[in-house]
Amino acid sequence: MQYLEAIRELKFVKGYQPVRTVHISYVPDEEIGGANGAAKFAKSEEFKGLNVGFMLDEGQASPNEKFRVFYADRTPWNLVIKALGMPGHGSRMFDNSAMENLMKSVEVMTKYREGQFDLVKAGLAMPSEVISVNPVYMKAGTPSPTGYQMNMQPSEAEAGFNIRIPPMADPELLRKRIADEWAPHYRNMSFVLTELGPIEDHMGRPLMTATDDTNPWWGVFQKAIISAGGTLSKPEILASTTDARYMRELGIPAFGFSPMTNTPILLHEHNEYLEESVFMRGIKIYESVISTLSSFEGGNHEST
């Protein structure tokens, strides 16, 4: 809505005429990975015909006066590990039951998760700069009409994890860790890894947009914020994921930005809100950002 209000103000009230074409896109499925939304759109002839030179996607609220800007996202992976073992009566004791095999893997993964989290707690890394491995479900047991058979050890057990990988991490090392340590064959383990989206751009580089003099759009964006009376915080990696990664995959510079200062981060939580004054100020910020970016004559002159 802030985009639309800013463009309405620029076009119909101020009569602004951009040098570059401004496109606004609405695509489905961003919350579930964007495979049938932005990913397909970015590969379409329609998108190619737009000749996009720069892209803005959503950012995140800032709890203080500074606006946050994001130059990269973490890539999501879904991992399901499955353990097999000898089924048997609850009174029996034997090695390598399905539950035992699964719990050994969960213990190893938990230690890895703690190691990554310790870097954050010690102030050595931001939450978005480490690999997060979070359990989302566990499933095992022999069903009964009232729940589970409490005197039976199951032959199968599985657990699911949501993994988020920052762009500077080596995905091949993580794949090897999963196969060798988290779900090794010698412990009757198997796994299904679903990698949701790209890891590298079309040149084999990490999906990051430069925030220095090598990227002329960065200076223009900074200028737009300053001109509107705003202050930017240090550029960050977004802990979650947006559709901007599909643009970065094509080599298109993309920033995540939402002009929401002095606002708690309440993504998908109860009572997520935005103060009216923050919303209205955000429109003015977008007016400056959109007009400044769309009048920039540097970079690729032939792009929009």
Image (tube, rainbow, N blue to C red):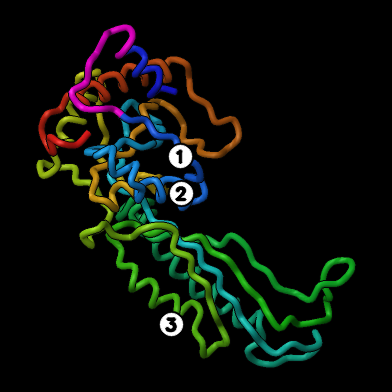
Question: Which residue sits furthest top?
Answer: 13
Q: Which residue is mark 1?
A: 27
Q: Which residue is mark 2?
A: 34
- Cβ–Cβ below 8 Å for labels 2 and 1? yes
- Which of the two labelled residues, at mark 3 and mark 1, occupies the earlier sequence position? 1
Instruction: Tell me which segment is drawn in magenta.
Output: 10-22
Residue 93 colored magenta?
A: no
Give residue 203's quadrant in the image.
Answer: bottom left
Spot occupied by residue 18 in the image (x, y as percentages of width and height): 22, 20
Give residue 85's quadrant in the image.
Answer: bottom right
| Residue type marked 3 | Asp
| Residue type marked 1 | Val
Q: Residues within 10 Å of mark 2 (few under 14, many from 20)?
A: many
Confirm whether residue 148 shows in the render. Answer: yes
Q: Is residue 178 left or right of residue 100?
A: left
- Which of the two labelled residues, at mark 2 and mark 3, occupies the earlier sequence position? 2
| Mark 2 or 3: the one toward you | 2
Q: Secondary structure at mark 3?
A: helix
Magenta stretch prevailing secondary structure: loop
Spot occupied by residue 103 in the image (x, y as percentages of width and height): 60, 76
